Image (cartoon, grey):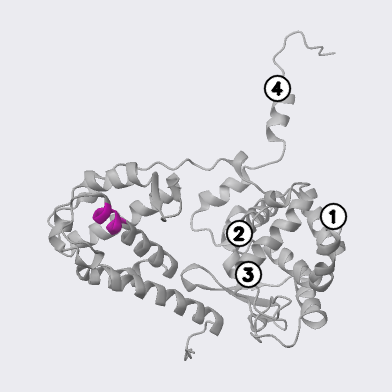
Amino acid sequence: MIKIHNKSSKPDNIVTKEHHTVEKIMKIERVLPYFMKDYFTYLKGAVSLNSRYAYLNDIKFFCEYLINNTDKINGDSIDKISLDDFNSLKARDINTFLGDYCTRYYKDSGISMTVYENNNRALSRKKSALSSLFKFLYRNEQINSNIVEGLNPIKLPKPQPDAIKRLYVEELNSLLNIVKTGDGLSESEKKYWDKTKLRDKAIILLFTTYGLRLKELQELNISSFNFTRKEFVIFRKRSKESIMPLNKSVENSIKDYIENERSKYSDDEDALFISIQNKRLSERSIRQLVKKYTSIALDKPRSNGYSPHKLRATAASTLIEFGFSIYDVQNLLDHDNITTTQLYSAHKKNSKRDIIINYELDPSKDKS
């Protein structure tokens, strides 16, 4: 068992979770070529912990590709790749990897063949990881040229307001009613709901009021809440601490759950949301919980229910619909760019229908 001596303002569960991510990062770093050591140090301060892990995974995947699918490398393992090998690579080699190999590749397990595909967003992240690496190696005077300048652009489709999935006000009201009454649940689901209805209501309220990210909600502790000050603390991306005000409905819901439903005997005494097994509720369980309730509110199969991120979109759209400034909503949801928040301000139900109904061009229309 690893004991963590926590001197930061972050709660122990977040520090422990970050520690496990660091362990996974270090495991990848031990496999990658030694000449990337300076780059590993650079990444620590350049990107968030999760991005760092994703970047190193993508770089490891690229190295495996070089060994197994090209004649560019002399060694037969990743750690044998030399700086000279990397120095010989050209922009076209990375473009071939991104534009040809990554879009569709195969893995043979010996029993079956699995086909993998990457969409533009996944390809863009891989490109960002490799661009970051080669740019650093060039600036660090380890390779002779900055081949990143020759990479082909990967164009991501711009999200359109009409494509944003969210709940409308009447659907949101229906969702809250379902969580409260259990209407629409099967008999077996109702037995489970009867033991967790106060917890589930608090979860749905937090998502739809504050637009919390799944990770932010899952990491909440009882000690995160200061009911005297009417506020609670969350930790955003890059471990940025943010204080959120409590409104009456959320405060009452959290208190009701803690006092009347939450077990006093949990494996994690400070965890806010726990399972029937008295363990901190996992991100996967929360995601399934949200999909279950939203599928009933939308009258769709369980598999077509909405994710927690769509409840985040619901919070943003509903707040703007109620007249709150997009700048205030941007601050509440921690959007890096105001254009992200603007997407929700443009998204209005029946906007196409309203335009067409009120825009008649037929001259034979009776205007009397």
Q: Amino acid at mark 4?
A: Tyr
Tell me, yes or no, if residue 23 can be seen here. yes
Q: Give the label on residue 359, or none.
A: 4
Query: Who comes first in sequence, dot 2 or dot 4?
Result: 2
- What residue is shown with label 1? 184
Q: How would you rate the neighbour count of disc 1 (Cα within 10 Å): few for under 14, some for 14-19, many for 20 or more?
A: some
Tell me, yes or no, if residue 358 can be seen here. no
Q: Read off the magenta span.
A: 62-68
Q: Residue furthest front?
A: 111
Query: Who comes first in sequence, dot 1 or dot 4?
Result: 1
- On screen, 83 above or below 258? above
What residue is drawn where x is 26% and y is 48%?
94
Residue 99 appears at what percent x and percent y?
Answer: 33, 42
- On screen, 332 above or below 347? below
Residue 242 figure quarter: bottom right
Query: What element does badge 2 sit on?
Result: helix
Of labels 3 and 2, the one closer to you? 3
Residue 110 appears at what percent x and percent y?
Answer: 41, 55
Query: Who comes first in sequence, dot 3 or dot 1?
Result: 1
What residue is drawn where x is 61% and y is 67%?
283
Secondary structure mostly seen in the magenta stretch: helix
What residue is drawn where x is 41% and y is 76%?
22
Q: CA distance from mark 4 to mark 3?
A: 45 Å
